[in-house]
Image (spheres, helix red, strand yellow):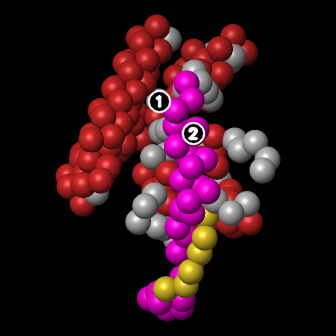
Amino acid sequence: MPKLKPFAYVVMILVGEGGAGPHDIVRMMQDGRWYWSGSDSQFYAEPKRLEKLGLLSSHSEPGITKARTVYQLTDKGRKALVEWLAEPSNMPRIQEEQVARLLGSEYVDDRTTIESVRPLRVRFEAELDAITRHEARIAEFPHRERPLRINLRLQRRMIEAHIAWLDEVEAEYGG
C-alpha cells in the first residue's frame, strides 16, 4: 500500500464509524476549514481512491432526489487509521495570506495595507457566530462531543488571535 498523506486520514476520520457520503464529507470539511484546507473536489475524489486501496467500502442508499454513495471504514482502513493516530503529530502548517500582504506592505501605502486586510474583521466575526452555532449542535454528535468542544475552543482562540492581530495592524498602520 502506498504511504498515505495526512489528508487521507482526515477523510477516514470524517467517514468515521457511522459512515458518510461525499456531500457529508465536504460539509464537515467546510465546518472545519480552520483546521484543514482543500478543495471540495479533493474531498469528493479521496474516498474513491481510499476505496480502491481497500481502506473504505461503499454502498448506495436512497437520497432525496437520487441514490447516494455512503462510505464506511474497512478493517484495513481502521487499522491504518489507528496506526497513524498513534504516531507523533507534526507541527501545524499555516498559510496566512494576510500575513504575506502585511509583509509586502513596503510596496504600497499604509491605507492600501489597511484596506486589504480590514474586510477580514467581518469574516472573523462571522466565524465566531458560526462557532456559537456549532457549539449548540455538539450534542448531536455524542461520539465526538469531547474533541469537538476542544477543537471549537481552539478555533475560537485562533479567530480571537486574528482579530487581535488585525487590531494591531490597524493601530500600527493608522487605521
Q: According to the image, label 2 marks what residue? A: 83
Q: What residue type is labelled 1?
A: Arg
Residue 133: image location, x then y, percent: 25, 52
92 w.r.t. 104: above or below? below
At mark 2, the secondary structure is: helix
In the rendered view, would you say 1 is above or below 165? below
In the rendered view, tell whether residue 112 sits above or below residue 24: above
Q: On the rendered structure, is 76 left or right of 151?
A: right
Question: How many marks on residues?
Answer: 2
Asked if the stretch drawn in magenta spans residue 68, the answer is yes
Residue at x-position 57% and y-position 21%: 91
Callout 1 touching callout 2 (CB < 8 Å): no
Work out whether mark 1 precedes mark 2 in sequence or the reverse, and give the earlier one.
2
Left/right of residue 164 with respect to residue 108 in the rendered view:
left
Q: Where is residue 175 in the image (x, y as percent from the top left)?
A: 43, 18
Could you say which quadrant of the image residue 51 lies in?
bottom right
Q: Nearer the viewer, mark 1 or mark 2?
A: 2
Percent across and percent down for residue 150 are: 30, 34
| Residue range of the region highlighted in magenta in the rendering | 62-88
| Residue 160 pos. (x, y %) | 34, 26
Observer-nearest of 82 and 101:
82
Residue for badge 1? 118
Residue 53 at least partly seen: yes
| 175 relative to 158, above or below | above
At horizontal 64% and vertical 49% (from top left) the residue drawn is: 8
